[in-house]
Image (cartoon, coloured by chain):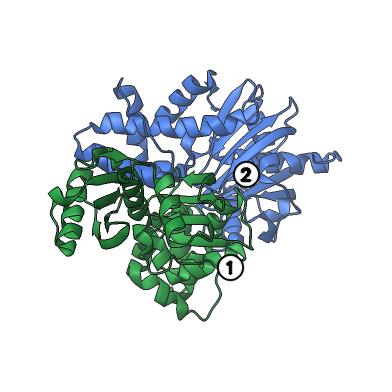
Chain colours: A green, B blue
Amino acid sequence: MIVAGCDVGSLTAKVVIMKDGEMIASSVKRAGTKPRESAERVLDAALSMAGLNRDDVDYAVGTGYGKDQIPFVNQSESEISCHAKGAWWCMPSARMIIDIGGQDAKAIKMDDKGNIVRYIYNDKCASGTGRFLEVMAEALGVKLEEMGSLAEQSTEKLTISNQCVIFAETEVVSLINERKKPQDIVRALHKAMANRVASLAKSIGVDENEDVVMTGGVAKNSGVFDALSEGLGLPLKHLPGMDPQLNGALGAALIANEKMKGK
Amino acid sequence: MTLVAGCDVGSLTSKAVIMKDNQLVGIGVIKSLSDPQDSADSAMNLALKNAGCSLSDIKYCVGTGYGRERISFVNEAKSEIACHGKGALWLVPSVRTVIDIGGQDCKVIRIDKDGVVEKFITNDKCASGTGRFLEVMAKVLNISLDELGDLTEKTETPITFASMCTVWAQADIIKYLNSGHSVEDIGAGINAAMAKRVAMLAGAVKPEKDVCMTGGVAKNKGVVSTLEKVMGVRIRKVRKADPQIAGAIGAALFSKARLNGGGAR
């Protein structure tokens, strides 16, 4: 039995293929302007990795901001449900997921059975989303992927006091003019971003004795990951053996799997 | 003759005024320099020159604005809110609510008939609802701020922006431009988004009539007319002097009150 989960986000599209309850292939591709095409492209990439074609897929579930425009899915599901499902499958001890995507940030609380207890979502303000980092990387003239390792070389502690992307960008420009080093500025930016996300998560209650996992593309940035751990006052966890960007697609595939099992 | 002064050092512009018997006799407005003291000096020198007097003629000077603690020649520093309230009342005696939108912040102040602050709210945390929002959008549209302000009356079909965040609205503009929407519809939509954000903030102080607007954004016709519609009130025009100097006027009025032995409330 082959199922697929497809998560079309604002910046990337992701697919996970499962066979008899095990993950056998996945793919992440930059999303274009048309969610439909992005979804098909990433599905075909994952299928070819598994040596399968579209007819082999018994059931597919879509999620993410473009979920209603994916042509090949049998149904769509909310991102919150998919993220909870995915994280629970990878790590049953997880009680909270903090997911930072390109244009949003969310925190989801789960009980010990993986049921969603509470969640909060920010897609109204670019602060605390991946866009914050993108804008700052551009202002600094550094690559987004390099920000994590750059921050590790920081020697001077700086503070960015603004959380608004627009105001923080101005602050970055003045720091550059003051000849502050990019690595120090980047570390300060990670901290500012982490504080924003930490307050979002804290608003629904964070228990420092429970496992909190970070997912989404920004989880790959070690600087934000560490700063967020610090901001929350607990050791954040990665999903074991999983690309953090795939969690939503994984959850969608798991829901497809349940459907097929007649749940 | 007793001369008093007020000096308002802001992040973008610095203003100084000199008053005699409740009348303006000298005004100095400059672009702020990197050091608040330099900004204060040069705005004050301009005002002194304008009034034809020297610093030693000034009996009392109150400073305000973000750089107020670092001006050597002031006798006292006062909050921007208090000064703006007082200054607005001098500009428009019937005013009870002042909406001041500057380059990087927005304040709404409700005052009583004597200009004493009853309630106020500020936003300097988020660029939305500040002059910066309009600056960013004008740049994307490749038009001047004045041109942006004129677009509202040129269309009946403004676009409704889904997000008030400057970053998201900027991305939306690009999408709308690419899909062939007119600059008029987009610009009018931007002015409306700005007005809605300001009205939301204003709602928190329970605004009372009359309402007036100060700060640079008061010059944007589109924002003002949409704000009137959203708030359901007429916004009184400030004609007596450049509304930009309201804070400095308020500061000078506090100076006068000090000399008259009154507690500068």
Q: Are marks 1 and 2 on the same chain?
A: no
Image quadrant where residue A239 sits: bottom left
Percent position (x, y) of residue B54? 66, 53
> What residue does disc 2 label?
B17
- B145 to the left or right of B106: left
> What residue does disc 1 label?
A230
Front residue (pair A140, A85): A85
Work out whether B91 lies above or below A146: above
Mark 1 or mark 2, whichever is nearer to me = 1
Residue type at mark 2? Val
- A58 to the left or right of B28: left
Front residue (pair B250, B187): B187
Work out whether B208 lies above or below B249: above
Residue type at mark 1? Glu
Percent position (x, y) of residue B184? 28, 30
Q: Is residue A159 visible?
A: no
Q: Residue drawn at (54%, 31%), measured in percent from left and top?
A: B200
Q: Tag 2's secondary structure?
A: strand
